[in-house]
Amino acid sequence: MWKRIYTRLAAAGLSACIVFVPAASAPAAPASRSLYDITPLERPDIPGLVISPSDKLPNLTARSAVVMDAATGTVIYSRDMDTRRYPASTTKIMTLIVALEQGTLDDIVTVSKNAEGMEGSTLWLEQGDKVPLKELLYGMMMASGNDATIAVAEHIAGSVPAFARMMNEKAREIGASDTHFVNPNGLPDENHYTTARDMALIAAYGYRLPEFEEIVGTREITFPWVKDDTHRLRNENQMLWLYKGGNGVKTGYTDAAGRCLVSGAREDGLQLVSVVFDSVYMWNDSIALLDYGFDQVEPEKIISKGQVVGSVSVGLFQGELEVKAAKDLAIARLKDGSRVKYDQKLEVPDSLTAPVKEGERVGRLVLMQEGREVGAVEVLAAASLEPEEQGFFSRLMAWFQSLWKGLF
């Protein structure tokens, strides 16, 4: 029992100091989005840590740190963000991404002997256990189960090395060019490394996936296979309780990596991601990073809800039907930066078949920056259209107009 408790505490990095009292008795400083009054801690003497005179957050205790806008990849603050470091259990962010994209969440995973015997933080899975893939992903991210990562990797790829190759292929696709994984859990290996910038890019990519935020942002959940009396998992990421808008993602700790934390938070439609590697006070550092990030950016509305953003052909002779944005679309803009030009790409079918109902989803509008997607919004039919609404000649004229537009 004590081994289990110690393992969970170490995996969560709970030996990292954070001093707080409930906001009800001591309101948080207005400048911070922390839900508690965080007592500032002096940065201790950290051997080998050199702070630049231009560092905007000199009291951070992390050797590497970054805060990034998830949509655009804009780096708002960084410290030594391109130095290779051991990521510990923050590795599991990439494991989750590969599992979400390559796995079938309703699949039943059979736990192998190899998974059962994993060292470090564990869900206490046993050989022969049968658990839905999606529930294993919760356990992997919330309680940092190393055994779950092996079960997931073997189920999806057949073996850990094959799954690691999938992880590395995805890292290159995302743009995490200075990252190399050899396992799905982050246990120490000299060939298993990443950078703060790369891990921020990986986490930012994760927020684009439908199930990602749901899993990493869950505080508590109950599953029958959890081997204690409560059958309940509690997320080890304290930022879900500490920070306003906190919505993920993962803690990590090994002796080689130090205390690591990747954090996400959303405010006014903007999603930021912060990373601290080898940090003394990882909670305090992450709060300071996210506060600084939100203070430096503001939402720039690109598309308004209900705005007509284009049209789509309907039938052979029924002309064009306007489409409108389903909601506002905002992008983070640095308050002291210049405005950025975004290209817009409307992703809709070549044509629709009537009847079409007003408000029906017909595609999406994508914002592009230098060829990379930085935001998207669903588009809806702006009006209803029935097959008999237009006469033959008017439909024929509309068809020629549509054809002419397509040619030029």
Image (spheres, rainbow, N blue to C red):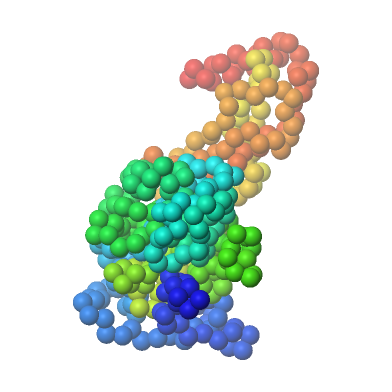
Residue at the far bottom in the pictured view = 25
Against 126, residue 173 (above or below) is: above
Asked which quadrant contains residue 274, the reply is bottom left
Against 237, residue 96 (above or below) is: above
Judged left or right of residue 364, residue 116 is: left
Q: Position of residue 83 (x, y in %)?
A: 25, 62
Q: Residue at x 56, y 61 (%)?
A: 217
Q: Residue at x 50, y 64 (%)?
A: 124
Q: Position of residue 377 (x, y in %)?
A: 57, 44
Judged left or right of residue 63, residue 400 is: right
Residue at the far left in the pictured view = 48
How many circles with numbers are drawn on the protein? 0
Along the line of sight, the residue nearer the viewer: 311 or 216: 216
Q: Position of residue 36 (x, y in %)?
A: 55, 81
Q: Position of residue 383 (x, y in %)?
A: 72, 33
Against 223, residue 28 (above or below) is: below
Asked which quadrant contains residue 355, the reply is top right
Along the line of sight, the residue nearer the viewer: 331 or 116: 116
Q: Residue at x 34, y 69 (%)?
A: 254
Against 30, residue 195 (above or below) is: above
Residue at the far right in the pictured view = 388
- Residue 77 showing in the rendered view: no
Asked which quadrant contains residue 64, the reply is bottom left
Q: Residue at x 61, y 22 (%)?
A: 351
- Residue 397 showing in the rendered view: yes
